[in-house]
Amino acid sequence: EVQLLESGGGLVQPGGSLRISCAASGFTFSSNAMNWVRQAPGKGLEWVSSISGNSGGTYYADSVQGRFTISRDKSKNTLYLQMNSLRVEDTAVYYCARNWGTFDIWGQGTMVTVSS
Amino acid sequence: AIQLTQSPSSLSASVGDRVTITCRASQGISSALAWYQQKPGKAPKLLIYDVSTLESGVPSRFSGSGSGTDFTLTITSLQPEDFATYYCQQFNSYLFSFGQGTKLEIK
């Protein structure tokens, strides 16, 4: 079964850091582009970052550029999002999703709360 | 960045109705448009990609159309499980973006 499972969310203070993970199974992780999409409480979807399949090129929304870093460990079939200099407005459910452009498989999400 | 504007933001309809949601892009995006359905507390689900191609397993009452900057999602004969929030998304450039969402509620 194709599956994505996020973990690592939690409560962090403004200015702090957090790394969230997404474990993939049931498909060839190394050749697929992967993405992070977030949803603030009661709000819509916001694309955050993408990493291409083979070249490993990375892309970021303006709102997180310079603060967040997307990466992947192909040996562990795991996608990461390192989040630094966190702000209150980064509070959201973070979803990982598969594929370039059209997100066909989604995880269940992990909640990140930035608050003092 | 390409902006997507959906209308309406919310919509009330009855089981059996036909509804249409529109999505307008701030610039041309060719056919790089997808539609997602999201139910409360759940992850989004891909319904349609490349404007009009139905994802596997999605009922045929869902359809998409459009080109350039104007796109539509149509649901014919609404079913109880269709009441949800719908989002359009563009992938014409690598700075992907979503519309603000359309909440479809039971009348």
Image: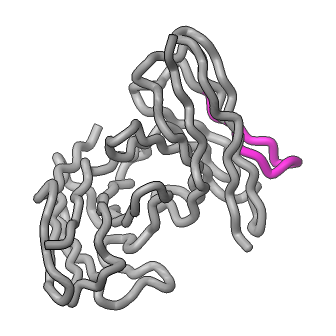
Q: Quadrant of residue A111?
A: top right
Q: Quadrant of residue A67?
A: top right
Q: Position of residue B58 (x, y in %)?
A: 43, 83
Q: Report the front residue among B22 and A115.
A: A115
Q: Is the image coloured rainbow, by chain, by secondary structure, or in one colour?
A: one colour
Quadrant of the image for the N terminus of chain B? Answer: top left
Give the overall secondary structure of the magenta segment.
strand
From where the camera sits, is residue B70 visible? no
Q: Is residue B78 left or right of residue A45?
A: left
Q: Report the front residue among B107 and B68.
A: B107
Vertically, is B79 above or below A43?
A: below
Please provide the residue range marked out in magenta: A69-80
What's the residue at 51%, 20% (across, down)? A114
Vertically, is A93 above or below A84?
A: below
What's the residue at 18%, 70% (across, down)? B72
What's the residue at 38%, 80% (across, down)? B53
Q: Report the front residue among A3 and A110.
A: A110
Q: Position of residue A108 (x, y in %)?
A: 59, 54
Q: Is residue A72 magenta?
A: yes
Q: Report the front residue among A110 and B24.
A: A110
Q: Is residue B15 left or right of residue A77?
A: left
Q: Is residue A7 magenta?
A: no
Q: Position of residue A59 (x, y in %)?
A: 52, 36
What's the residue at 39%, 62% (across, down)? B38
Quadrant of the image for the C terminus of chain B? Answer: bottom left
Q: Is residue A58 left or right of residue B23?
A: right
From where the camera sits, is residue B80 visible? yes
Residue at the right extreme of this rendering: A75
